Amino acid sequence: MRKIWIPTAIAAMIVLDQLVKWWIVEHIALDTVQDFIPNVLSLAYLRNYGAAWSLLQNQQFFFIIVTLVVMTGAVWYLVKNLQGSLWLVSSLSLVIAGGLGNFIDRLRLGYVVDMFHLDFINFPIFNVADSYLTVGVLILFICLMKEEDHGLNN
């Protein structure tokens, strides 16, 4: 059953990411920020030619290579652990969807579309794919730490 829903879930997450990015490009002017939920969340349209916090600006070739390596590893680990814990499978699916969502932007546009601005904290503007990556990596880290704990206790 997982062989069917995992690729479907990954594809659905990528479609959601791309739809949100499309909507932002169509409805928000470039380099502007608009209130969405006052004092909590604003919507913006920024072009990010780098990584988080705009690091490594205009290093598209580097990002393409890194993404290909990381996605290959994530897919391999997912296939290897397909029958593993739901948390592990879900975390890898989030990482893959997030990585591919931003990869599509880099290939298609030469930059990543970012749109969410947290008004209550000084934090970089991010997108749906970034959210997938952040949550996926966090859950993956917890899963791997728990796995290591079980290995040490045996």
Image: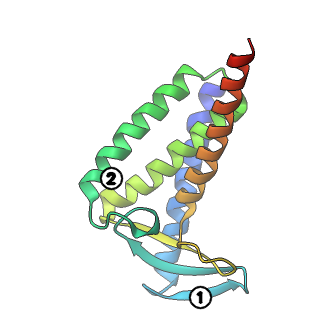
Residue at image coords 53%, 57%: 129
- Name the residue tied to disc 2: 63
Q: Position of residue 53 (x, y in %)?
A: 46, 68
Q: Earlier in the sequence, mark 2 or mark 1?
A: 1
Q: Residue furthest front?
A: 152
Q: Residue at x 68, y 17 (%)?
A: 151
Q: Residue furthest top?
A: 154
Farthest left residue in view:
61
Q: Position of residue 31 (x, y in %)?
A: 44, 85
Pointer 1 local density, CA inside 10 Å: few below 14, some 14–19, many at least 20:
some
Question: What x and y, as percent, mark residue 130?
Answer: 54, 58
Give the color scheme: rainbow, by chain, secondary structure or one colour.
rainbow
Per the image, label 1 sits on a secondary structure element best described as strand
Residue marked by disc 1: 34
Q: Note whether 55 is above or below 151 in the view shown.
A: below
* In the displayed structure image, the side of residue 88 where residue 125 appears, left or right: left
Q: Is residue 8 visible in this depiction of the protein?
A: no
Q: If the image is split into quadrants, where does the C terminus sit?
A: top right
Mark nearest the camera among 2 and 1 is 2
- Residue type at mark 1: give it: Gln
Give coordinates of residue 24: x percent, y percent.
52, 76
Hey, what amino acid is under mark 2? Phe
Q: Secondary structure at mark 2?
A: helix
Residue in front for this viewpoint, 98 or 69: 69
